[in-house]
Image: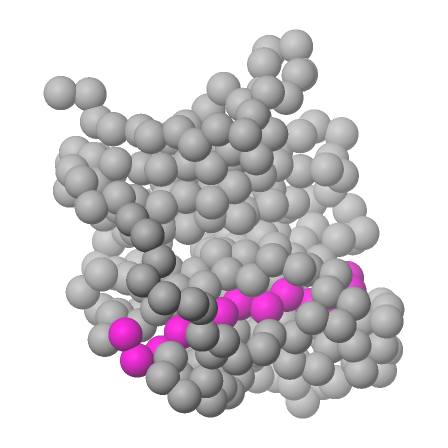
Amino acid sequence: TEASGPPTKVVDLPSEINHHWTKAMTISPDGQYLYVGIGSNSNITERGMEAEVDRAMVWQIDAETGAYKPYATGLRNPTALAIQPGSGQLWAVVNERDELGEDLVPDYLTSVREGGFYGWPYSYWGKNVDPRVRPQNPDKVATAITPDYSLGSHVAALGLDFSTAAMGEQFADGVFVGEHGSWNRKEPVGYKVTFVPFSNGRPSGEPIDFVTGFRTEDGKTRGRPVGVTVDPSGALIVADDLANTVWRVTRTP
């Protein structure tokens, strides 16, 4: 429970301006690589592409040497990363762009393909062109990958982890997603932890509300879930950055 020595810097991450200052991280099953999600410095490059160097992407970092490369790009703000048990596949939740209305653009859950491009800033949800972006880039849009699963618009997904059988049959295969909640909708969404069921390694059904009650019936907010993780016993750990509380959720015997 105590550090055995001083910290060692592995690599510097982009930090100029730092519009999306949090950086999600997970580690490969063999411990060789770190995967770090780095958000954009803008909504749709209004600060210019110079401010977006090495941003809106997932880095793969050699944990021993610090050498890094872009693993996947076009991810506006990959706020949480997790490795799928068994397959070793990297997954992310991503917060998308704003100011296209209450119903656009959906935040999403997706597998992250090495070398894949996911659209930002030129397009969203695959090849849907964002007409506000200048200059356009049709060649990049033609390669854009459609994400695996929509979480809904502006839910502000900030947490992700895979479930285990300890949660019971209904919740044995899938992911928990912490939804911090919207700031730009007349009818707020999010403010909960949802469970996305999986089948054959992929999302396979409607999300299930798993932890709720962060907003009261009269519209008052008393909690906002952010990071989620599953502990070694299978319990769900939820960080709540409004109540300054860490919740532990277990299956009722």
Towards the viewer: 234 or 87: 234
From the top left corner, tell me how far across and down residue 235 is, in percent: 25, 36
Camera-nearest residue between 100 and 72: 72
Image height of 240 relative to 95, above or below: above
Q: Is residue 88 left or right of residue 121?
A: left
Q: Position of residue 42 (x, y in %)?
A: 77, 64
Residue at (49, 19) in percent of width and height? 213
Residue 242 vs 207, above or below: the answer is above
Query: Could one spot residue 185 in this view of the protein?
Result: yes
Counting labels gives: 0
Left or right of 2 in this view: 24:
right
Q: Residue at x 31, y 29 (%)?
A: 249
Up the image or down, 142 lies above or below 124; here it is below
Q: Is residue 158 magenta?
A: no
The magenta stretch is 31-43
- Classify residue 75 by image quadrant: bottom right
Does the segment drawn in magenta span residue 38?
yes
- Asked which quadrant contains residue 205, the reply is top left
What residue is at 75 percent from the left and 53 percent from the top?
Answer: 98
Give the residue drawn at x 50%, y 61%.
24
Q: Colour scheme in the image?
A: one colour
Residue 72, x across and y down, in percent: 51, 78
